[in-house]
Image: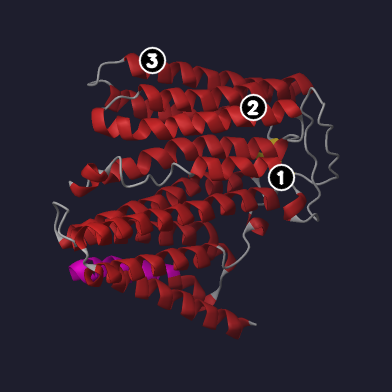
Amino acid sequence: MGSPVTGSHSPSSLSSSSLNPRARSAGRSSRSICHPFAEVEPPSACGAVTLPPGPLRGLRARGLRTAGQSGVAPLAHGWAWMNFTWFASAYDCDDVPYRVTTLVQIAGVLVLAAGVPRLFATQDLTLAITGYVVMRLAMVTQWLRAAASEQGEARRVAVRYAVGIALCQVGWVVVVLLPDAVRPVAIPLGVLCELAVPVVAELRMQTSWHPHHIAERYGLFTLIVLGETVAAATVAVQSAVDEHEELGRLLPVAVGGLLICFAAWWIYFARPVHEHLRSNRQAFAWGYGHYLVFGAAAAVGTGLEVAVESAVHQAEISATAATATVTVPTVLYLLTVWLLHSRHTKTGLAQALAPTAAVLVLACTALGGSGVLAAGLVCALTVAVGVLLHSREG
């Protein structure tokens, strides 16, 4: 992360052997800010954020252990993707080495995704951490290329990034070798070290970034996570219908889940936010805050799968607890989007919409089996009221 810049952008040749700093014009269309190849990474990363029901179906049926599963994938993929996004906004992304390195990152995403079910089934970290280290070492290569293209303090910033990320990967390899009893302490320490790398690297100088590009990339990631959430819930409903033929019990969960996902999409993109990203301080808070957005969106999908299994009496938890696996992440999503977006872009009664909706959605938990449908209706009503208030402003 760094500071916003203006200027003109000259794309590098595909045969370029170095990375050139980007100088983007604030007046340019956000669709032309980044080379299209940079758009390959978000869908690839998101593909494993919401996991398919098959590998972890047993864990979901046993209930709240899914909370951990729904958080690990967004944490690992989201952090690697965030670093990639800010780097792409700072440096040229239109040459062969950049593209090859991006493909390596995508391969790491797939390996990590393949390792997550094993992580929860047998507590085996090896495959998941291997995939993560592959992703991050590819990012080290990018920063070393940037350092070779820079001079002075800018070069030192790039070197600090490369060294910091590399040291963190050494730490993750050590975590694999540690006894199971030590890992609950070592893993949070590793996460904190990862989060500290950008802060330490940019203490004296900030890399450049473009508000339109950053807002567009984060919006794309959010959109794809929500899409994965809908897909995961669809597969769960289909499987339940095939196995139990109880469509009547599943329809309220399906309709409520669809309304929640639709409202989540609408609320996130209700107003453009790039004008709020005016300084490094705002960008850091906004970027890190999206951890909660991504994690909550993914957790909604996992919660809908739990609610589906509860509806056909396959979950070993109460209907209220199953509903909570949907309503609680929905509340977290609404409040986080309000903190990051709505409170900066809306005025008057519209400011209170998301917090009010969050309280009502949480109250829907007490309705048990019908709570998901009720939460969906609350979210849909929130969107409708928001549209009405916006039309009156105009």
The residue that label 2 is drawn on is: 101
Q: Counting other residues with Cα less than 10 Å from the Cα at mark 3, is it few (<14), some (14-19), or many (20 or more)?
A: few
In terms of image quadrants, where is residue 256? bottom left
**Taking the image as drawn, is residue 195 in sight?**
no
- Disc 1: which residue: 36
* Crowd class of label 2 (few under 14; some 14 to 19; many from 20; radius 10 Å): some
Classed neighbour count for the residue bearing mark 1: other residues with Cα under 10 Å, few (<14), some (14–19), many (≥20):
few
Q: Which residues are magenta?
A: 354-371
Q: Which mark is residue 174?
A: 3
Question: Residue drawn 38% across and 53% down?
Answer: 232
Q: Give residue 158's position: percent from left, percent from top.
A: 67, 24
Which secondary structure lies at badge 1? helix
| Distance Cα–Cα, label 2 vs label 3 | 25 Å
Of the 4 image quadrants, the one containing the C terminus is bottom right
Identity, as a three-letter code, of the amino acid under mark 1:
Pro
Q: Earlier in the sequence, mark 1 or mark 3?
A: 1
